[in-house]
């Protein structure tokens, strides 16, 4: 992999962390809270943990979806321009 390719790959991974970070953070803390709730109440129904996570994931994607798409589109545009220029 060339130096330009490695740089582009590194930037893509950073962008993935920035764009996916809010979704993963919300799901992590929600899962932690649900785990404590299930342990305290001894309710071990899988639906108790699944449905809130799905709703939260859709809510975060709905709230931040435009911002995520803007960042991903800007990265794609810049990457295609850099590849067209040869580096």
Image (tube, helix red, strand yellow):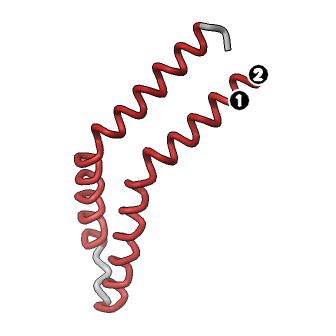
Please provide percent x and percent y for residue 77: 46, 19
| Above or below for 17 versus 37 | above
Identity of the residue drawn at 64% across and 36% down: 10
In the image, 60: left or right of 17?
left
Residue that carries the numbered disc 2 in the rendered image: 2
| Above or below for 82 versus 1 | above
Q: Quadrant of residue 12?
A: top right
Please provide percent x and percent y for residue 2: 76, 22
Contact between labelled residues 2 and 1, with CB atoms less than 8 Å apart: yes
| Above or below for 68 versus 3 | below
Please provide percent x and percent y for residue 9: 63, 32
As helix, strand or loop, the secondary structure at mark 1 comes to helix
Please provide percent x and percent y for residue 48: 25, 73
Which residue is outermost to the right? 2
Residue neighbourhood size for the residue with mark 1, other residues' Cα within 10 Å, grouped as few (<14), some (14–19), many (≥20): few
In the image, 49: left or right of 14?
left
Identity of the residue drawn at 29% across and 41% down: 65
Per the model, the C-alpha gap separating discs 1 and 2 is 6 Å
Q: Quadrant of the C terminus?
A: top right
Residue that carries the numbered disc 1 in the rendered image: 6
As helix, strand or loop, the secondary structure at mark 2 comes to loop
Q: Quadrant of the N terminus?
A: top right
């Amino acid at each position: 992999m060339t130096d330009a390719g490695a740089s582009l790959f590194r930037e893509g991974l950073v962008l993935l962390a920035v764009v996916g970070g809010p979704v993963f953070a919300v799901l992590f803390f929600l899962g932690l809270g649900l785990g404590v709730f299930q342990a305290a109440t001894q309710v071990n129904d899988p639906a108790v943990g699944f449905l809130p996570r799905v709703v939260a994931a859709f809510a975060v994607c709905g709230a931040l979806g435009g911002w995520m798409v803007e960042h991903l589109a800007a990265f794609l545009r810049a990457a295609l321009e850099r590849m067209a220029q040869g580096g």
